[in-house]
Image: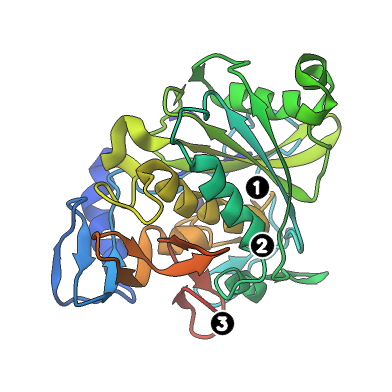
């Protein structure tokens, strides 16, 4: 594995899969009635209300990021954290949080296949997640300026027609973000296809199903977030790929899903995961667990709590902006600390 200091990847060395299966089922998960869902994952089925906990084989699990390692690039350096201040099942390390972030999206590759509603599904989520009881869980995290607010402002999305090809590296993902916030993109498609330079934001790079990320998408992680100085500004960004090339790796549901789009429905949960981590640990020096390096969302990865089963067999556990989503819970930093769907 490469050493990374300014990226929060979700590694899952294959040998740890078994251990993690136990780990993720331990806290707060129902131990009764476990069966196999269509994912071959742990899922508890009752009439309509179910405890849902799936296990992607490529779990979102961090490893190296908070443990210090040689620097990769940019002046963000390593995890220079201040004194640890215990929270409830998670620790504060002195860094800043994003109190009321803006969100931008870069749709990379081809998202215009007829019938593909991914843009609708994911932008609807980002437009409406702020203010929800679910996102309110993040208000249990603070820095010296105060708590995270239950507010997200989805500002804008742009497209990128394979500017870095179909085989991406971590650096190419950063290049995609950089390109969107510089004037390069405006030359190609008009200024309307560029993004502002905004340090109080999370930039999502959503890559289409034909795009690979060679540092381990679908083999060791499902998504990641990072920060990097771009154009003299500390830019926070996240990679979330369309997992259609291997739904068994990252998809939350593999046969039917609430929005009729297995990939986008999976990406919705990943997007929420990365958003809440990028907000509470934007520079990888704020909120994470000392022992494991887990950020808030990592503590509840693929843990959905109570979910409702639709007649077609799909599950959802929340309605946001009028759409059903099956979105993993988030760690509530309130005594005693637990995974929560709302707060
Ligand atoms: Zn994570």
Instruction: Give percent across and percent down for residue 102.
Output: 75, 52
The spot of residue 265 in percent (x, y) is: 42, 50
Residue labelled with disc 2: 93
Question: Which mark, by number, is residue 79?
Answer: 1
- Residue 317 at x, y = what percent? 40, 69
**176 displayed left or right of 213:** right
Query: Dots 1 and 2: beta carbons under 8 Å?
Result: yes
Asked whether residue 305 is in view, the answer is: yes
Work out which quarter of the rendered image holds the C terminus and state it. bottom right
How many marks overall? 3
In front: mark 1 or mark 3? 3
Q: Nearer the viewer, residue 12 or 201?
A: 201
Regarding residue 289, the answer to whether it shows in the image is no
Seen in the picture, residue 13 relative to 95 is either above or below; the reply is above
Q: Quadrant of the N terminus?
A: top left
Q: Quadrant of residue 217?
A: top left
* Precedes in sequence: disc 1 or disc 2: 1
> Does the Cβ of the disc 3 residue fall within 8 Å of ligand 1?
no
Q: Earlier in the sequence, mark 1 or mark 3?
A: 1
Q: Is residue 236 above or below residue 313?
A: above
Q: Secondary structure at mark 3?
A: loop
Q: CA distance from mark 3 to mark 2?
A: 17 Å
Q: Residue at x 26, y 41 (%)?
A: 248
> Which sits earlier in the primary sequence, circle 3 or circle 2?
2
Q: Looking at the picture, how far across and down is residue 99, in whole percent?
A: 76, 64
**Front of the two marks 3 and 2:** 3
* Mark sitting on residue 334: 3
Q: Residue at x 66, y 65 (%)?
A: 130
Question: In the image, what residue occupies the spot 30% across and 39% down?
Answer: 247
Residue 330, labelled with which disc?
none
Query: Which element carries disc 1, helix, strand or loop?
Result: loop
């Amino acid at each position: 594995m490469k050493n990374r200091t300014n990226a929060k990847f979700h590694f899952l060395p294959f040998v740890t899969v078994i251990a993690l299966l136990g780990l993720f089922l331990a806290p707060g998960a129902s131990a009764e009635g476990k069966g196999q869902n269509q994912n071959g994952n742990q899922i508890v089925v009752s009439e309509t209300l179910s405890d849902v906990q799936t296990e992607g084989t490529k779990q979102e699990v961090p490893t190296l990021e908070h443990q210090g390692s040689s620097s990769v690039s940019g002046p963000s350096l390593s995890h220079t954290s201040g004194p640890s201040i215990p929270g409830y099942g998670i620790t504060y390390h002195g860094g800043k949080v994003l109190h009321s972030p803006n969100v931008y999206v870069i749709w990379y590759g081809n998202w215009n296949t007829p019938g593909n509603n991914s843009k609708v599904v994911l932008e609807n989520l980002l437009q409406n997640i702020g203010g929800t009881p679910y996102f309110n869980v993040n208000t249990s995290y603070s820095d010296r300026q105060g708590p995270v607010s239950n507010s997200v402002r989805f500002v804008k999305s742009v497209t990128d027609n394979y500017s870095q090809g179909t085989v991406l590296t971590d650096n190419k993902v950063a290049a995609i973000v950089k390109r969107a916030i510089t004037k390069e993109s405006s030359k190609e498609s008009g200024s309307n296809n560029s993004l502002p330079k905004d340090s109080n934001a999370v930039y999502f790079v959503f890559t289409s199903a034909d795009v690979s990320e060679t540092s381990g998408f679908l083999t060791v992680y499902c998504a990641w977030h990072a920060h990097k100085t771009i154009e003299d500004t500390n830019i926070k960004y996240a990679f979330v790929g369309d997992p259609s090339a291997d739904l068994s790796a990252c998809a939350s549901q593999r046969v039917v899903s609430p929005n009729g789009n297995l990939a986008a429905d999976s990406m919705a949960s990943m997007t929420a995961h990365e958003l809440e981590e990028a907000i509470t640990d934007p520079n990888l020096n704020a909120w994470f667990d000392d022992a494991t390096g887990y950020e808030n969302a990592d503590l509840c990865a693929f843990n959905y709590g109570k979910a409702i089963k639709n007649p077609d067999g799909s599950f959802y556990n929340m309605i946001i902006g009028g759409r059903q989503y099956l979105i993993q819970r988030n760690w509530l930093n309130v005594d005693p600390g637990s995974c929560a769907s709302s707060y």
